[in-house]
Structure formats: C-alpha cells, structure tokens
Image: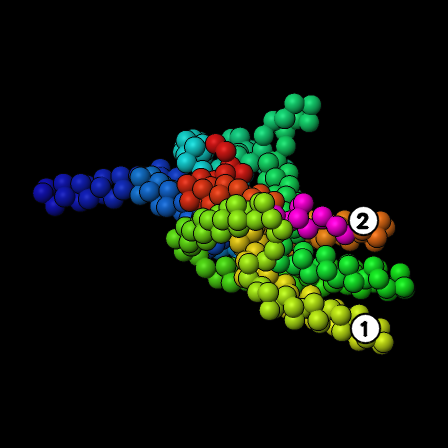
Amino acid sequence: MKKLIKLLFTLVVVFTSISIVKAKDYVDLYLFHSDSCPHCQAERNYLNKLEKKYDYLKVHEYEISKYPKLVDKVRKAYEIDNSYVPLTIIGSDYIIGYSQSMNDQFKDLIKSYHDNKGGYNVVQKIIEGKNYKKNFDKNGSIYKGGTSKSVPILGKVDAKSVSLPLIAMIIGFVDGFNPCAMWVLIFLITMLINMKDRKKMWILGVTFIVASALVYLMFMLSWLTIISQVTQTWFKYLIAIVAFVGVFINLKSYFKTRKQEAGCDVTTAKDRKKIINRIQKILAEKKFALAIIGIILLAFSVNLVELACSAGLPVLFIQILKLNSLSVFQYGLYIFIYLFFFMIDDLLVFIICMITLKVKGISNKYTKYSHLIGGIIMLVIGLLMAFKTDWLMFNFK
C-alpha cells in the first residue's frame, strides 16, 4: 500500500513539473548591437537585469560586425531602412535605440508577449532559414528610439538625420578659417595676383585648397579607424578632456589676437619665411606640372603642421559620428559634407580675391574669430560628451 502511495505521489510530482514547464512560455528577445556604441552597452546592462528578474525572458545578443548577413535579413524582414543600433526585436515588434526613459516600454512589450504565449518568432525562423509571414500580426506598438520629433508644418522629423548634416556644415565651415592654413592661402593669392596667366592662377589656387582637404580626409579616416577599435566607455571622457584643452587653447589664441593680425601659433617666423620662399620658387617654376606638384606638396606640409593646432574639431566631429553607429555610406556622406564646407570659406576667399584682385584685410577680419567660435563649439561638445552623451546621439528623452 505504501509503495502504491509513493508511486502515485511521484507521478503527481512528475506531471505537475511537466505542466509547469509547458506553462512557462519563453519570450525571446534579440539584441543587435555594436561594441563601440555606448547606448548598446547601457541596454545590455539593463536587459541583463531584466533577464534575472523575468525567468521567462531569453536575451540573444548579436554584434552587428560579426553577423552582417543576419542583420541585413532581419532589417529587410522588418522593412527597417536605416542602420541604427541598438536594434531590439521581440516577436513581430522592434525597438530602435535605447535610453532609460524607454525602460517601461521594454517591460510592457516583454510582458505583452509573455501573456500572449511568446508570439510569432520571426528572427528564429530567419536564423533557421525557414519561411516567415510577410504581413505578420503585431501584438504591440513599434517603438523607434527617441530621435524623431514633431515639428509644426513639417510633421515628424528624425533629429539625427537633420542634425548630423547641420553639425558637419557648421564645424567644417568654422574649421576652414583656421589661421595656420589661411595665412598661407592669403600669401599664395597675393603672389598669384601678380601672375599674367589667369588660368594658371585659378588652377594653382584650387589645387592648394583641394589638396588641403585631402590631408584632412586622410586624418579623419585614420582617426575613425582608430576609435572603431576602442570599445571602452571611458574613451568618451578622454575625448571630453581633449575638447576642454581645445577650449583653453582657442580662447587664449582669440584674446591674444583680437586686436592684431591673426596667425598660426605653431609656425614660427623663421618657418613662415621658409614657406614664403617655397611659394615664390613654386610660382617661378617654368614647367607648370612641376608647379602643381609643388603646390600639392606645400598644401600637405602646411596642413600637417596645422593639424597640431586644429585637430580638435575634426576629432570631436568623428567622435560624434561614431557615437551614432552609422553605416559606411553615412560616415562617408557626413565626412564629405564636413570637407565641402571646410573648403567653402577658402574657396570664397580665393574667388573674391581672384575677381577683385584684392587681398587686404581678409585674414585679419575673419580668421581670428575661428578661435572664438571653435572654442565655443568645443566647450559645448565637451560638456555634452561628459554629461549628456544621449544628446549627441539626438535622443532627448
């Protein structure tokens, strides 16, 4: 009799356990993230806490650089036309971006799927190579990260898609007036005006400006490659310190030169004399091809020296781009915008001088203010980098 009771008790326990396991409907959450994205790391920490709190939650993490094909298939399935991360997917719903203000949205969506017994797992079917429903039902709202804002008349506007080009324009334009390269351009224009061949004047001047932009392009791409390898969150504070040092240097230079001709603090009077002699020799060269090569080499050497006092702005700009985890095309597009506006002020100065054949007062009137404006920009970016990184990712919640 006792054996029979024990057997019945054992059967009850086994069947009860089986029923409990069956009753537990897991919610699979898929997180597509980048190791260099601070928002991604913040969400990973939060989801780790949720996974411990909800025993029915399973978090699957995929670093986008390691699973590019899967990421493309998932974005195509959900008709996501951007490459922003973090990208979080639960069943038929997705969330782009992360901030602490979205925590309740995550909880609500997770609970909603648990109440609906897991929902329709699209990502798992993609991973397994199985067919999935194109027009699947959505159990909850689709949350898209906090970069969109309602604007009167225009409606809903993505702050990131509007602000990044604007930032590229402003910083690039201000950077273009840096005195280190501007004084060389001004002296070059002074010498070009005395040339009889106007066609050669235009070609040599534009060559100098374009070559200067190429130096910046190589520097910015190199810096982007370097910081792409850095995933530590402390790095943004190091960049903030660089910004504050830049603020001090730029404001000091502004107050030093506001009542006098602006110039480059890096280039000494002796170096300036050597550069002037080089320009004179280049323009005196009878072979035009050699003159162009000389101008290109001059632009490279001058702008490499310039980077010693003006690297702050491009460094901060690249860091802002990196924070937003953009696609290769987007990185290229925003760097191109930056360089275009970097060249615009030089081109404007050059064109005006070539048309009017006058140079007087241009360097003193404009270049010295680049220190003031550059210092203010660095101060703002440095403060945001240190205390409000979300704002540099255009997430204002």
In which image quadrant can residue 137 be found?
top right
Spatial CA span between label 2 and label 1: 24 Å
Decide if residue 254 is in sight here. Answer: yes
Front of the two marks 2 and 1: 1
Res 66 visible: no
Q: In x, y percent, where is residue 96?
A: 53, 40
* Residue in front for this viewpoint, 337 or 291: 291
In the image, is residue 204 above or below residue 385?
below
- Label 2 SS: helix
Residue under the point 54% across and 38% down: 394
**In the drawing, what numbered circle is on residue 284?**
1
Near-viewer residue (375 or 42): 375
Answer with mark 2 or mark 1, whichever residue precedes in sequence. Answer: 1
Please say if 255 is above or below 329: above
9 or 232, nearer to the observer: 232
Question: As drawn, which residue projects farthest toward the front?
Answer: 260
Identify the main secondary structure in magenta.
helix
Disc tally is 2
Q: Position of residue 181 (x, y in %)?
A: 65, 59
Residue under label 2, please give it. Answer: 352
For residue 156, side relative to residue 316 (left or right)? right
Where is residue 122? Give x, y as percent: 54, 45
Pinpoint residue 11: horizontal percent, then vertical percent.
23, 43
Q: Secondary structure at mark 1?
A: helix
* Observer-nearest of 45 and 110: 45
- The type of colouring in the image is rainbow
Most extreme residue toward the top is 152
Residue 286 quadrant: bottom right
Give the magenta range: 359-368
Which residue shows up at 57% across the image and 56% down it?
Answer: 310
Name which residue type carries label 1.
Answer: Ala
Neighbour tally class for label 2: few under 14, some 14-19, many 20 plus, Cα within 10 Å = few
